[in-house]
Image (tube, helix red, strand yellow):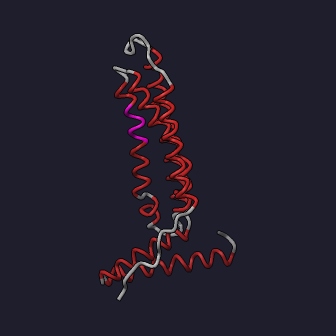
């Protein structure tokens, strides 16, 4: 009956932004590892390494709290479109980004007892990656908050369930799409959205 999902992924400027961000991070990491010399006489005794690792961990933890608190608040404010929005927003990419931030917070703390130049460079490189990915993450996150994105996801889910011939879920998904479309139509008609 159904052969393919009608929505195909078309590369957008946001996709190119992810690639540009990773390229910028790779160039920064190469510069950091080649040019930046961190070689004191005794790395374990140098207080600068301890301070740098501690400050990096604290800064990343503060950013983690701010970024994901703002994300949760924005998701709650836009959950008026559908109760399924939180599942839709916290996708694989968001969870991966949260994991990257957690690693960037914990790794400097693990390296604190015995710092050396390699460990410091690794932590700086991971911190730079987490910071550079902020722009594509927020672009992706804001796109996921739009009703268009939610409707596309609900449509794809209902299309998959139609193919599986699961009648109860099929009716619920179609009702969710209908209610969301009606809400958006009324909202735009009144110019409240």
Q: Residue pushed farthest right?
A: 191
Q: Position of residue 66 (x, y in %)?
A: 53, 42
Q: Which quadrant of the view contains residue 183? A: bottom right
Q: Residue pushed farthest bottom?
A: 1
The residue at the point 39 percent across, 57 percent down is 92
Q: Position of residue 20 (x, y in %)?
A: 54, 49
Q: Which quadrant of the view contains residue 3? A: bottom left
Q: Quadrant of the C terminus?
A: bottom right
The residue at the point 47 percent across, 72 percent down is 8
Q: Quadrant of the N terminus?
A: bottom left
Q: Position of residue 125 (x, y in %)?
A: 46, 35
Q: Is residue 137 visible?
A: no
How many labels, in total? 0
Task: Confirm whether the magenta stretch covers residue 105.
Answer: yes
Q: Is residue 33 left or right of residue 70?
A: left
Task: Confirm whether the magenta stretch covers residue 120.
Answer: no
Q: Against 151, is 78 above or below?
A: above
Q: Against 106, is 87 above or below?
A: below
- Residue sitting nearer the eye, 21 or 73: 21
Q: Position of residue 18 (x, y in %)?
A: 51, 52
Query: Which range is magenta?
Result: 101-107
């Amino acid at each position: 009956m159904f052969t393919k999902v009608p929505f195909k992924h078309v590369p957008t400027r946001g996709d190119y932004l992810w690639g540009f961000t990773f390229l910028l991070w790779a160039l920064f990491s190469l510069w950091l590892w080649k040019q930046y010399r961190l070689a004191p006489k005794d790395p374990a005794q140098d207080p600068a390494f301890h301070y740098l690792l501690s400050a990096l961990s604290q800064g990343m933890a503060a950013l983690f709290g701010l970024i994901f608190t703002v994300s949760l608040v924005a998701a709650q404010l836009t959950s008026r479109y559908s109760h399924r929005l939180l599942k839709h927003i916290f996708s694989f990419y968001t969870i991966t980004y949260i994991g990257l931030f957690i690693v960037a917070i914990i790794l400097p703390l693990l390296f604190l007892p015995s710092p050396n130049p390699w460990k410091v460079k690794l932590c700086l490189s991971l911190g730079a990656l987490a910071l550079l990915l902020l722009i594509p993450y927020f672009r992706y996150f804001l796109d996921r908050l739009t009703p268009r994105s939610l409707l596309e996801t609900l449509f794809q889910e209902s299309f998959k369930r139609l193919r599986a011939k699961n009648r109860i879920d099929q009716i619920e998904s179609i009702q969710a799409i209908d209610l969301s479309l009606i809400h958006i139509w009324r909202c735009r008609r009144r110019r409240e959205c």
